[in-house]
Amino acid sequence: MTFKSGFIGIVGPPNVGKSTLLNRIMGTKLAIVSPKPQTTRNRILGVFHQHGCQMVFMDTPGIHKTRTALHKSMVDAAFAAFHEVDIILMMVEANPREDPAVPSIIRGLKSIAKPRFLVINKIDKVKKEHILPLLADYGRKLNFDAMIPISALKGNGVDTLLQELKRQLKPGPQFFPEDMDTDQSEAFMVSEIIREKIYEHLSQELPYSCAVTVSKIEDVAKKNLVSIAARIHVESDSQKGIFIGRGGRMIRKIGRAARLELESLFEAKVYLDLTVRLEKNWSKDTRALKRLGY
């Protein structure tokens, strides 16, 4: 049997469930998930292995109107995926109210001569009779190779999506070994878990004003212990005070939640040294963005 493979980009507006879909397909948590929009900042690869094929999924930041250099880098990364993958999954919500980003995404896709799938997510939240009109409406906007309604959260329709993707794949090499499910480093995974806990514990705009870097991951010999040093970068003194909290309560709360998930990731006890550092206006500074991994 001929081996098939390819890169598949998951693109769409913020908060439509792109990361949830990646995690559902992979059967493990590769991308952080939050009900807040614009959570994903970097492209994340998930390598899905199946008999006779390998699908390399690329989760991308949500496409939205940009306000800062950080937002521009996120949207640029998403649009660049159009040209770097073999198949594009445009993901939208099962909502009759169209997201403002949809027209620009469709304009970008019209010039792309490669398979284009429409994935309508969150069908578990609407009545079935609302789905067909949505499919017809999107079908008039762009000639998709397949249009598939799913619930990434509950798994409905995801097997159908994978079957259709496999049909569209062309013969190709095995890009990654079978025991590899992502290209992300341990440091990146650690920073993303910490950032997810920030989204869970802090409200409004505060999580968007921080970045997380990891300076150390060290196995402590004979103790089944991983020692990690990480830093939260914020943009103002007032933000720093909120992140630390009265008597250090907030930073301890974030650190405790992150440590519990990190222990599951590393299957070992984790010592997490988490600090907060002021880095004024980093999200507007292109040099700071590069230094912080964006």
Image (spheres, rainbow, N blue to C red):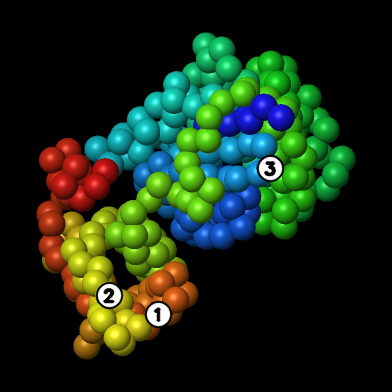
Q: Earlier in the sequence, mark 2 or mark 3?
A: 3
> Circle 1: is it few (<14), some (14-19), or many (20+) Cα within 10 Å?
some
Looking at the image, residue 34 lies above or below residue 166: below
Numbered label attached to residue 51: 3
| Residue beneath disc 1 | 268
Vertical comparison of 16 with 146: above or below: below
N-term-proximal mark, 2 vs 1: 2
Please indicate, yes or no, whether residue 117 appears anywhere in the rendered image: no
Identity of the residue drawn at 37% across and 44% down: 42
Q: Name which residue type carries label 1.
A: Ala
Secondary structure beneath label 1: loop
Residue in the foreground of this view, choosing between 230 and 162: 162
Q: Residue at x 83, y 47 (%)?
A: 127
Q: Does the rendering let one see residue 196?
A: yes
Q: Secondary structure at mark 3?
A: loop
Locate residue 238 relative to residue 62 in the image: left or right. left
The answer to which of 233 and 42 lies nearer the viewer is 42
**Residue type, mark 2 in image:** Asp
Taking the image as shown, residue 170 lies to the left or right of residue 203, namely right
Is mark 2 in CB contact (under 8 Å) with mark 1? yes
What is the residue that sits farthest to the front in this orientation?
1
Residue for badge 2: 219
Q: Residue at x 61, y 23 (%)?
A: 171
Q: Amino acid at mark 3?
A: His
Residue 176 location (% of width, % of height): 47, 41
Q: Earlier in the sequence, mark 1 or mark 3?
A: 3
For discs 1 and 3, the disc positioned in front in the rendered view: 3
